[in-house]
Amino acid sequence: MAQAILETVFDVIYLVGVISAGFVMATRGAKNPLVKKFGLMAVLLGAGDAFHLVPRMIALWTTGLEANAAALGIGKLITSVTMTVFYLILYTIWRERYHIQGRKGLTYTMWGLTAARVALSLLPQNDWLNYYQPLSYGILRNIPFAVMGVLIIILFAQEVKKAGDRVFRFMAPAVLLSFGFYIPVVLFGNIIPPIGMLMIPKTLAYVWIVQMGWTLYKQTPKAI
């Protein structure tokens, strides 16, 4: 019961907060394309996570997680795709924020990694409808995702330092933390269930990323 209460309160606050902030940025940040992109990212983040978190909340209050394996698995699949697109959008924000020209190879790489992650996530061998899914495919589909994360960390770290960007100065650490909390769950979540609690600080790292977009929004003249 305690787990159901704590998770439900946390998830509801998170989903409502992120989606609301995203909607505001997307609709009222018209004078800054980067703010609109952050708004889209935030809505995508919240909406994608909702497909997993809402069934999880229902499961905790009813028949349990294993009994709702199919709904949870489909939610995880959707979240897997939306989070990949989240980082692709963040890459476009990096290009626009720091006026990056050319580097087509890097762009092709990011798109290729996105396509690979989505394709691997859609493979039937992931066994999404079962509660205990094969670890091998959990690792496989996360390889391109992790490479995307490493690239985003390096790219932002380099440009933030050169530009003296105060708004995004913590973008690289936030992305690093999100992956740092996520990877142990992928590797050991089925073996040591309490490790799944790392998804909470992972989620907070994503909130931190959205908060940086909100800071940019507050600095931008509002659309009339």
Image: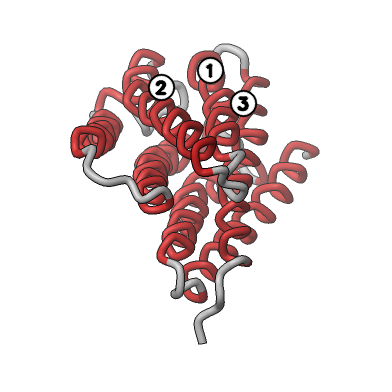
Q: Residue at x 41, y 15 (%)?
A: 135
Type of amino acid under label 3: Gly
Q: Disc 1, disc 2: CB below 8 Å?
A: yes
In this picture the colour scheme is secondary structure
Q: Tell me the mark number nearer the camera, choosing from 3 and 1.
A: 3
Q: Is residue 152 above or below residue 150?
A: below
Is the residue under label 3 in contact with that under label 2 (CB below 8 Å)?
A: no
Numbered disc 2: secondary structure: loop
Q: Amino acid at mark 1?
A: Asn
Q: Is residue 125 left or right of residue 138?
A: left
Residue at 27 percent of width and 31 percent of height: 113
Mark 2 or 3, nearer chain start: 2
Residue 46: percent from left, percent from top = 52, 53
Residue labelled with disc 2: 133
**In the shown orientation, is residue 219 left or right of residue 44?**
right
SS state under label 3: helix
Q: Is residue 77 left or right of residue 6?
A: left
Q: Farthest residue toward the right? A: 2
Look at label 2 and name its amino acid. Answer: Gln
Inspect this view and state whether residue 171 appears. yes
Q: Quick one: label 1 or label 2, which is nearer the N terminus? A: 2
Dot 2 crowding, Cα within 10 Å, few <14, some 14–19, many 20+? some
Q: Is residue 20 visible?
A: no
Q: Is residue 215 rendered to the left or right of residue 34?
A: right
Find disc 1 in the rendering and name its residue.
190
- Give the Cα separation between the discs numbered 2 and 3: 15 Å
Residue toward you, 108 or 189: 108
